[in-house]
Image: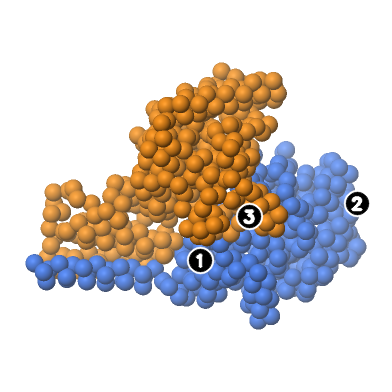
Amino acid sequence: MTAHGEQPRGRRGGTTKGDGMAEARVIPIRGNRGPARADEQASPAAAPPMPMAPDEQEQPAWETALEQVLEFLRRRLTGDYQVDEFGFDPELTEAMLLPTLRPLYQRWFRVETIGAHHLPETGGALLVANHSGTLPLDAAMTTVAVHDEHPSHRYLRLLGADLMFTLPVSGSLARKAGVTLACNPDAERLMNAGEIVGVFPEGFKGIGKPFRDRYKLQRFGRGGFVSAALRTGVPIIPCSIVGAEETYPKIGDIAPLARLLGAPYFPITPTFPLLGPAGLVPLPSKWYIEFGEPIRTDHLTPADAEDPMLVFNMTDQVRETIQHTLYRLLSQRRNVFLG
Amino acid sequence: MSSSTPKVVLVTGVSGFLGGHLAARLAANPDIERVLGVDTVPPPRDLLKRMGRAEFVRADIRNPLIAKVISTAGVDTVVHASLSASPASSGGRATMKEMNVIGTMQLLAACQKAPSVQRVVLKSTTAVYGSSSRDPAVFDEAIGAKDLPSGGYAKDAAEIEGYLRGFSRRRPDVTTTVLRFANFIGPRVDTVLTRYFALPVVPTVLGYDARIQLLHEEDGLAVLERAATHELPGVFNVAAHGVLMLSQAIRRAGKVPVPVPSSGVGTVSKVLRGARVVDFSPEQMRFLNFGRVVDLTRLIDDFGFEPRWTTTQAFDDFVRGKALSPVLGAERIASVERGLLGLARGLRQERA
């Protein structure tokens, strides 16, 4: 629309300045968004990109970075981006959400990811993980792990509790990050579309368990996740997360206050609510995320999803695998904070 | 079926945008002998002119007289397109409910008694799925609403669909088609949503960003026309491909979103209603919280219709067609961007 009319002017302005950089300064309309995004990803706006194409040596790195930031801002302000039917906004995730989480992943928790080769190159999969830590930092870190450690930077599409979508801000932010409601229609739709879906079958029982029960897996629900995987024929990847339990050790629970707020629990940790907002800083535990060997389901038929015995056995198999991996990782860990 | 083209079509709600233009399209089809348009008020003059040979019958579908119209004309296809969504245009919520629910009951009773009727097409809405945080992200036709719509337009539509199911049990020889339309948008249609986006500053609910799926008015008309002239029994979601976030749509229109805390939303909508700008009902406010997206598999595979406009294209067409005056236009943003880049370049050259 308007961009069409503006483009020639912008280009001419560039050539009169006499640096022959028209190519870099073309204001992309919609078509050439792909490469621009790839650039952004390779060099987050915060860190100036050093190695650039040889013909760009005239232009200092900060100016290229400025161009990218401005272009990103313009696209956001004019609504020129795409979301999928679940509300997932890849551009925002790539440019804002993941870069915010990355320091936490790399520096604070120093996450070590094991077995990323078990994540499929293409096609759907169901990642089943243990849930812990009072606040769902494990979900955020697993999202970073899948994206950064996978060779083709795939997105993890998490399934979240309905409480998250009822609350303001968290609900809309979660949707933009690719989370959707934990229900079978959504899970199957995503897996049929070839996405890696992540689920925490323990739910609030897992994330809100007291510190003394750390690394003890809670009940895995009714195995709804197994039937969803069976119906879509995608592999189940057990995922064991060590370290999240120690971020906010929940040593107490003010149940009446939780009821008042409509929350599943109101945690007391060594630092919260004692230190107020400072108590929200997670303890810097050393994390390990291990993706286990995929459990294949393609030899089974969708009809098997109706067989309660089979679903139950498979649920148990996944649960046992995660529990044993947790014990193994824990026995190898010498120190909670140093690893 | 061999005789799929109808002979005599009755369209309700012809004074509205959809009913009127549908009557015009059907009147342009030489295979159809007669097109009757029914409404309580005559259509605007330009719409009447467009309707051509379609006949306007001033009748109230709440009145049993409608049975006489159907039987004397030998109507074989009824397109019930008068379902109204905004209380203001139909004279208050009570009248709107009566028009929607009682009107449909009378109309279906008349159809049941008329042996000539072979096909009934109902214009329903995707609002029957409700809108809540506990719903799946994408609704297909088999999913019921988690929270049944408690009032307003959505409840009317859910009840009317129930009546039609009852009707088809009593008259199994009649083909019934239920079309659940997403919100219409386009340069010509006038709905609550188009007025909402035309506001200079657009109130949104703080902390929520709805996924909205729209339908271009032309696609909507084409679907209604196809349902009226083909044998396509069943329930179908009708919407465009793709999704826009509410905040994104507001920015595409060049408007400024103003987030209002949930507790203040009621007041804002009351003010807007009082000023006769936009008449927002509670269920439409919930729609602005969570939005709604529907599955189109049945529309494409079984109904045989592929929407020509995506949600984004339809919305852009609406913005262009209505010539909305942008408060914060794309042009201005682009010029600020150029200005800043020029400044940076100037700085560099000065230093060199």
Distance of label 3 from label 1 (alpha carbons) = 23 Å
Q: Which of the two residues, B2 or B62, is positioned nearer the viewer here?
A: B62
Does A283 sit left or right of B9 as displayed?
A: left
Q: What element carries label 2?
A: helix
Distance of label 1 from label 2 (alpha carbons) = 48 Å
The residue depicted at 38 percent of the width and 60 percent of the height is A75
Q: Where is residue A186 in the image (x, y as percent from the top left)?
A: 60, 41
Q: How dense is the environment of label 3, judged by Cα within 10 Å: few (below 14), some, or many (20 and up)?
A: some
The residue depicted at 13 percent of the width and 52 percent of the height is A55
Q: Which of the two residues, B93 or B204, is positioned nearer the viewer here?
A: B204
Q: Is mark 1 on a helix, strand or loop?
A: helix
Q: Which of the two residues, B84 or A48, is positioned nearer the viewer here?
A: A48
Chain appearing in orange on the rendered image: A
Q: Which of the two residues, B334 or A207, is positioned nearer the viewer here?
A: A207
Residue A128 found in image quarter: top right
Residue A166 numbered mark, or none: 3
* Circles 3 and 1 in contact, beta carbons < 8 Å: no
Q: Earlier in the sequence, mark 1 or mark 2?
A: 2
- Marks 3 and 2 on same chain: no
Above or below residue B56? Residue A46 is: above
Q: Which of marks 3 and 2 is in front?
A: 3
Chain at numbered mark 1: B
Q: How dense is the environment of label 2, judged by Cα within 10 Å: few (below 14), some, or many (20 and up)?
A: few
Residue B113 numbered mark, or none: 2
Distance of label 3 from label 2 (alpha carbons) = 48 Å
Residue B310 seen in the current view:
no
